[in-house]
Amino acid sequence: KAGVTQTPRYLIKTRGQQVTLSCSPISGHRSVSWYQQTPGQGLQFLFEYFSETQRNKGNFPGRFSGRQFSNSRSEMNVSTLELGDSALYLCASSLDEGGTDTQYFGPGTRLTVL
Amino acid sequence: GNSVTQMEGPVTLSEEAFLTINCTYTATGYPSLFWYVQYPGEGLQLLLKATKADDKGSNKGFEATYRKETTSFHLEKGSVQVSDSAVYFCALSILPAGGSYIPTFGRGTSLIVHP
């Protein structure tokens, strides 16, 4: 079974631009979560989507948004990029909605904001 | 709120040494506890988990026991290998009744194993 895939793997943007990241979960998984990983803050939860609905949300500004499609693929969008948005963005999928279910992580998208 | 505290690294060991990485947590309720490992350039992989008190998770020679009385979930391995060099994350997840959950991760502990 193929793992979680994320595209692109690397991205360079400038301040003020917007960016869209994509995540394809493991086949059959209906939940997709997004995380931001930085050296300073560690791994922080952005949001979770299940059956095309955002179910949980971390403490991030409204510039960070996402969506999930009927095939469970998910996209994350960041508008008006700031230097501090430079990070590794990880996507994780699981069979069911949040909580105790095991999450399977993708390799991440490395975003650099100049 | 919920939190996870891990020992700071890096932890540097010689091959075949005994490993302990401490992890303690605070949570309202009874969380599930996880250890994830991240190899360079890769995403996180689940190493082991425990869903209730006194459960022991184990995988690839690693073990951790869910200790409710000390709110701990320390990771141990009897004999580390160079290939175990990675960053290890302790995490908790809890689904409160009627509320949404936010999975909580520790800051990660870097392990370096020398031949």
Image (cartoon, rainbow, N blue to C red):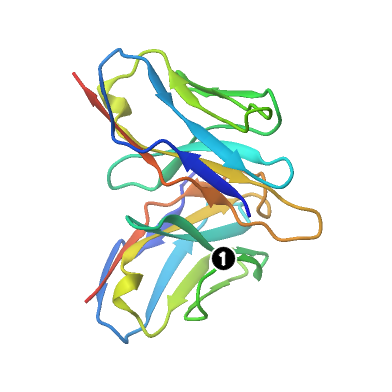
How many callouts does the rendering have? 1
- Which amino acid type corresponds to the residue marked 1 in the rendered image? Gly
Residue B109 visible to the viewer:
yes
Q: Which residue is mark 1?
A: A58
Residue at 59% x, 43% y is B92
Q: Position of residue B25 (x, y in %)?
A: 58, 40
Furthest residue toward front: B70
In the visual, does A65 lie left or right of B53?
left
- B101 or B39: which is nearer to us? B101
* Whole-percent x, y for residue A60 in the image: 51, 71
User: Label 1 lies in what chain?
Assistant: A
Residue A40: horizontal and vertical position, in percent?
34, 57
Question: Which residue lies most toward the left here?
Answer: B115
Q: Is residue B14 above or below residue A109?
A: above
Where, quadrant-wise, is the C terminus of chain B in this rendering? top left
CA neighbours of label 1 inside 10 A, class few (<14), some (14 to 19), many (20+):
some
Q: Is residue B60 visible?
A: no
What residue is drawn where x is 41% and y is 70%? Answer: A21
Identify the residue shown where x is 64% and y is 49%: A95
* B36 is higher (above) or lower (below) than A94: above
Which residue is farthest right? B98
The location of residue B40, given as percent across then percent down, is 28, 43
Label 1 SS: loop
Q: Quadrant of the rendered structure where residue B21 is?
A: top left
Image quadrant containing the N terminus of chain B: bottom right
> On the rendered structure, is B76 left or right of B70?
left
- Residue drawn at x 53%, y 43% is B91
